[in-house]
Amino acid sequence: MFGLFNKTKEHTAYINDESSPVTLKVEKGKTLLNAALSSGLDWPHRCKVGSCGSCKTQLLAGKIKPQIDFSYVLNRNEIADGYVLACQSELCSDVRVKVNLDNIKKRNKL
Amino acid sequence: MRFFVNARYLIVPVSSLVTITGILLGGIYAWLGVALFGVYTVIDTVTKDIRFRAEKDANGNSYGVKVFQYLVMYIMLPVFILLQLVLAWRLYQYTSGVPIGTANISIFSYQLGISGLHLIGATLSTALWAGLGIIYGHELSHNKKEGFFVSRLIMALSGASHFTYAHVYNHHLDLGHEDDPATAPRGRNVYWHTWLSHVGQSKFSYDLEREKLNNQGKSTLSFKNKWILGYLYSLPSVFLFVWAGGLLGVAALIAVWAISNFLLEALNFMGHYGLIRQEGHPVEHRHSWDNDNVFTSWFFIEIGRQGDHHVRGETYFWELDDVGAPNYGIGYFSLFVLTLVPFLFRKFVKRLLEDWDENHATDEERLVADKFKSIGIES
């Protein structure tokens, strides 16, 4: 109920490493992928419309609001393991996520 | 500036209302929708060299007002329903043998009853504007919230609700490749493309649902199947036209659906004709044709900025811009007329494709183009 009065304008995504994660501020209404790209993170992606699955990430903690039904792109096992599409995920709380480290490079200091 | 930037996209909503008014008035006015299409073709042709970039304020923000533009797009759903209702009303009058005469509502007079000739005009007017209205179904298909559902309903009015899923999950992913039924390869004409693209997208949408439901351990034959649901959304139109006109009503609805889907597939045809993308490689600006003269841009709510749209699929239409994609140099209305005569279209597009092969294609894409040429297909 108190969530109704929660006016949080942004949440934080903690990316990968548990002890010293890359942190990312995600404004309300913005997707995880767009926030990452705006911040200079080279997050893997291709279509940005939820079709290709390139931006998939594993949600380890926290809640997201999916903008589409992920089951069109992710299989049952991936969904069970908590995978989500970053391009179609808004944050409902602070989250901890894991993405492919090989593809993620910090271009600019956050 | 803000008012102008937002108001200029109201050509289709206003024209749709004019078309509805014409059918309501009856008589020669039932042809208003067809006449508008002709007038706009002329305007589009004479303004082919006038272009604008997307305007931005001093802070680099677009002047587009999201709430307003979405409100207009949502309102277009009842407008298109109204379009079908007024045609059904005229069908009912015709099949019931209502005598032709003048009736009045307050100070306004309209024709009661309708002749067979003017009923054809009303049907064509409805079909053309139902087809042109598909631009809203397209734009809303990229909205993942309630807009996606509104898109499905708008497309269902043309019996093409499968488009919404196929466009996002197939066309945007497989564009320029043989896996995308909506991309027309060199040598295909718009009439053949309409069938292949329509059936191909519907099949994709069915397969997508089957796979999703199988993954979830559910039956394909269920109301969870969005492909089935999409066609069920079209049933009210079928019932309406059968009730209004019996067999003639069915014929009228088939005409409306055939023409509106033809216009939809003609847009797909023009958007990527003959362009080639290597499988697995990213979609880039060069994989789409732009049609961005002033009238096409405003009328088709910037759908002609295909190069930008396909690379930034999440971007609102009023923010799309010229990105240096290959450009036909003429608007959609003019180009559409050319596509109706396949020989002329291929002649027109030949030099453009030669330029694309030479200046835009990668070596791998050029190899595919050469294969077409080796079997005598140059454009």
Image (tube, coloured by chain):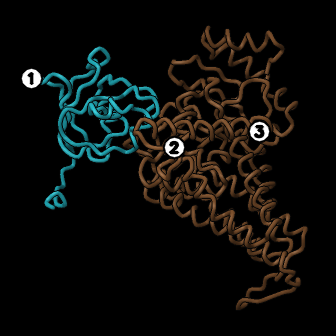
Residue A7: image location, x then y, percent: 18, 55
Q: Residues within 10 Å of mark 1 (few under 14, many from 20)?
A: few
The kind of residue tagged 3 is Leu
Distance, label 3 to label 2, CA atoms, is 41 Å
Which quadrant, please, contains the N terminus of chain A? bottom left
- Taking depth in this image into account, of B353 and B135 the one nearest to the observer is B135
Residue ID at (57%, 33%): B171
Query: Which residue is the site of mark 3?
Result: B335
User: Which chain appears brown?
Assistant: B
The answer to whether mark 1 and mark 2 are in CB contact below 8 A is no
The kind of residue tagged 1 is Ser
Residue A97: image location, x then y, percent: 22, 30
How many numbered marks does the figure carry? Answer: 3
Which quadrant, please, contains the C terminus of chain A? top left
Specify whether disc 3 shares its chain with disc 1: no
Q: In the displayed structure, does residue B164 sit left or right of residue B84?
A: left
Host chain of mark 3: B
Query: Which residue is the site of mark 2?
Result: B220
Observer able to see residue A49? no
Observer able to see residue B364? yes
Kindly state the secondary structure of the residue where label 1 is placed: loop
Residue ID at (15%, 22%): A17
Specify whether disc 3 shares its chain with disc 2: yes
Residue ID at (53%, 53%): B5
Distance, label 3 to label 1, CA atoms, is 59 Å
Q: Is residue A65 above or below residue A18?
A: below
- Taking depth in this image into account, of A78 and B278 the one nearest to the observer is A78
Q: In the displayed structure, does residue A31 sit left or right of residue B182?
A: left
Q: Residues within 10 Å of mark 2 (few under 14, many from 20)?
A: some
The disc label shown at residue A19, or none: 1
